[in-house]
Image (spheres, grey):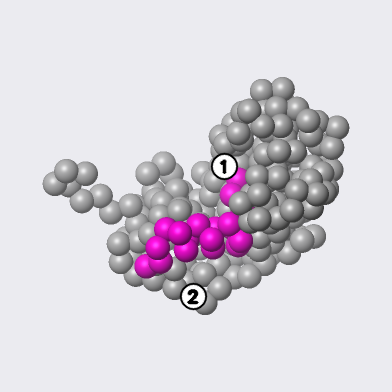
Amino acid sequence: MGTTAVHALRGLTLQVNKGEFLAVQGPSGSGKSTCMNIVGCLDLPTKGKVLLDGKDIAHLKESDLAQIRGRMIGFVFQKFHLIPTLTAVENVMLPLTFQGVPENKRLDRAEYLLQLVGLRDRMHHKPNELSGGQQQRVAIARALAVDPPVILADEPTGNLDSATGVTVMKLLQELHIQQHKTLVLVTHDNHLASHADRVAYLSDGKIVKQVQHE
């Protein structure tokens, strides 16, 4: 930033195991979002390596990163990021469109996923016709569209009331357990982090503590 160097992460070393539910926790400004962006191939580090399925992605071109994101990683954001002009089923179909999946298969997959998240009866509604919890469930269905092995969730309950947040968190846990998804949850919430197999605590861009849950 001008002449000031801002070190969002400082020599961070973190391993996420296949099928694990990891929570990355820390206060505002600790580096959580930067960590998730690098894990999710949205940002590249200025130094070091990022190994995804054994391959170093730290120096790939954006086009190659986009292909990896499209195939391997599903994103769930705090603000949902649904396309407002598309219906729920069209939002879920969108990642499959980018992967060149035929329309009939896209529709079948989207309908299946919306049924999975309990929204089959709302699939032709647009985001402004859905509650916050319903929008987040559409976002989770969209994240699952290409059946990625990794789900990254950045404060997924941050814009929801507590009861709806519990429902969304339960859904993410079920995906982790029943579909063996690797789930990385970024949160400042102790209660959400308590559901994870392991919690990595960030402070000033470094992991200061890790706690394994039984």
Residue 158 seen in render: no
Q: Which mark is residue 77?
A: 1
Which residue is at a point 41% across and 41% down the rendered structure image?
28
- Crowding at label 2, few (<14), some or many (≥20) Cα neighbours within 10 Å? few
Q: Where residue 160 sits: x, y (%)?
A: 64, 31
Residue 156 image-quadrant placement:
top right
**Could you tell me which quadrant the C terminus lies in?**
bottom right
Seen at 39% across and 71% down, the residue is 49
Splitting the image into 4 quarters, where does residue 147 fall? bottom right
Q: Nearer the viewer, residue 86 or 80?
A: 86
Residue at numbered disc 2: 55
Indicate yes or no whether the magenta region holds residue 135: no
Residue 187 percent coordinates (x, y): 54, 46
Q: Which three-letter amino acid code belongs to the residue tagged 2?
A: Lys
Left or right, 59 with respect to 73, comes to: left
50 and 191: which one is in front?
Answer: 50
Specify the quadrant that holds the N terminus. Answer: top left
Foreground mark, 1 or 2, reads: 2
- Which residue is rendered at x = 34% and y = 70% of the image? 48
Q: Secondary structure at mark 1?
A: loop
The kind of secondary structure element at disc 2 is strand
